[in-house]
Amino acid sequence: MSILVIPVLTRSFSIEDFAIFDLFLVLNNFLVTMMTLGMESGIALLLAESQDDKTPLSFLFVFSLVSGLIATMLIWSLFI
């Protein structure tokens, strides 16, 4: 997807605006990765230990997804 979007953005933004957009993407990916890395490894350990009870595990996966989205929205709102 970025192969299609980046050329359009570089033509429509100035160099300074694109640099700010690129900094946002780098910071967002770094912070979301750091935040969800612990959750994903913890969920993987829980999954390996408990084979029977799948309801709490599915809740944990949804929780990690939602928390990643919330972190992205918070970082996005800080840049605006």
Image (cartoon, rainbow, N blue to C red):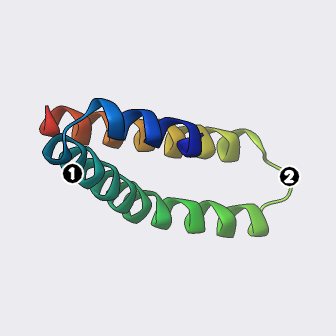
Give the camera-side residue of 55 and 10: 10
Give neighbour class at mark 2: few <14, some 14-19, many 20+ (Cα, 10 Å): few
At label 2, the amino acid type is Asp
Q: Is residue 3 above or below residue 29?
A: above
Q: Are marks 1 and 2 in contact (CB under 8 Å)?
A: no
Image disc number at residue 46? none
Q: Is residue 56 left or right of residue 29?
A: right
Give the camera-side residue of 10 and 75: 10
Image location (x, y in percent) of residue 4? 57, 37
Q: Residue furthest right?
A: 52
Residue picked out by circle 1: 19
Residue in the picture at 49% in, 36% down = 5
Residue picked out by circle 2: 52
Tell me which numbered mark, 1 or 2, is placed earlier along the sequence: 1
Image location (x, y in percent) of residue 60? 58, 46
Q: Quadrant of the N terminus?
A: top right
Q: Is residue 23 left or right of residue 55?
A: left
Residue in the picture at 28% in, 57% down = 27
- Assign a secondary structure to mark 1: helix
Give neighbour class at mark 1: few <14, some 14-19, many 20+ (Cα, 10 Å): few
Q: Nearer the viewer, mark 1 or mark 2?
A: 1
Q: Is residue 25 above or below residue 67?
A: below
- Assign a secondary structure to mark 2: loop
Marks 1 and 2, how far apart at CA: 49 Å
Q: Which image quadrant for residue 3?
A: top right
Residue in the picture at 78% in, 44% down = 54
At label 1, the amino acid type is Ala
Residue in the picture at 25% in, 36% down = 76
Image location (x, y in percent) of residue 13? 25, 34
Q: Quadrant of the C terminus?
A: top left
Q: Residue furthest front?
A: 11
